[in-house]
Amino acid sequence: MRIETTGLEGCFVMAPHVFKDNRGSFFESYNEASFKEKTGISTKFVQDNQSISSKGTLRGLHFQKGEHAQAKLVRVIRGKVLDVCVDIRKESPTFGQHVSIILDDFENKQMYVPRGFAHGFLVLEDNTIFSYKCDNYYNKASESGIIFNDPTLNIDWQYPFDKLLLSEKDAILPTFQSLIDEH
């Protein structure tokens, strides 16, 4: 497994070694010892989640607050997404910065999203299966988020806003500035 830095502290892209032959392909999607050796991060994942979405679906930008914060290891099992991570750790030198990457079922790259990041993704192909591991259990009272089209973050979703499929909850998330003002 190859680990690529993203420019945001603690946020990594993992690129597996994919073995292909006439039968298909094989790759190791996660190895705790290898991940710790290459990143210095020791993570115990306790919950796996999966979604199936239509093209144009935007999920995010989500995070869990306080003691229920979650690190995530995200990947696409089928299809393609634009994956976005935003550093919301106020003490971080990359606070307020974001990174985006295409995750798909061809390269099988994964994104490690540390605690203290907001995360979201835009589905680029119908019937995309998105899967992620979390290092902490979901807690409804701790869920929060930032509106996808926040003017301060200025994320280029590379997709027309009028064609997006959003949940009611995601369409009314607060701005990044209101998150800053909250603390």
Image (tube, grey):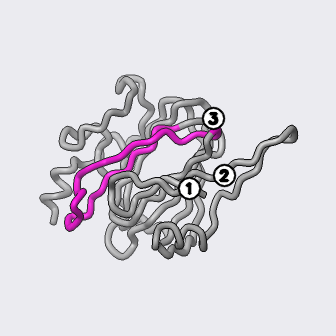
Query: Considering only vertical position in the picture, is 46 above or below 182?
Result: below
Q: Position of residue 119 (x, y in %)?
A: 40, 52
The residue that mark 2 highlights is 17
Quadrant including the N terminus: bottom right
- Mark 2 secondary-structure assignment: loop
**Magenta part of the chain:** 81-106
For badge 2, the amino acid type reads His
Relative depth, front residue between 37 and 85: 37
- Mark 3 secondary-structure assignment: loop
- Residue 83 seen: yes
- Nearer the observer: mark 3 or 2; the answer is 2
For mark 1, does the 10 Å Cα neighbourhood hold few (<14), some (14 to 19), or many (20 or more) residues?
A: few
Residue depicted at x 48% and y 53%:
13
- Name the residue at the right extreme: 23
Residue depicted at x 66% and y 51%:
17
Check residue 16 for magenta coloring.
no
The numbered dot on residue 2 is 1
- Upstream in the sequence, badge 1 or badge 2? 1
Q: Position of residue 21 (x, y in %)?
A: 83, 41
- Upstream in the sequence, badge 1 or badge 3? 1
For badge 1, the amino acid type reads Arg
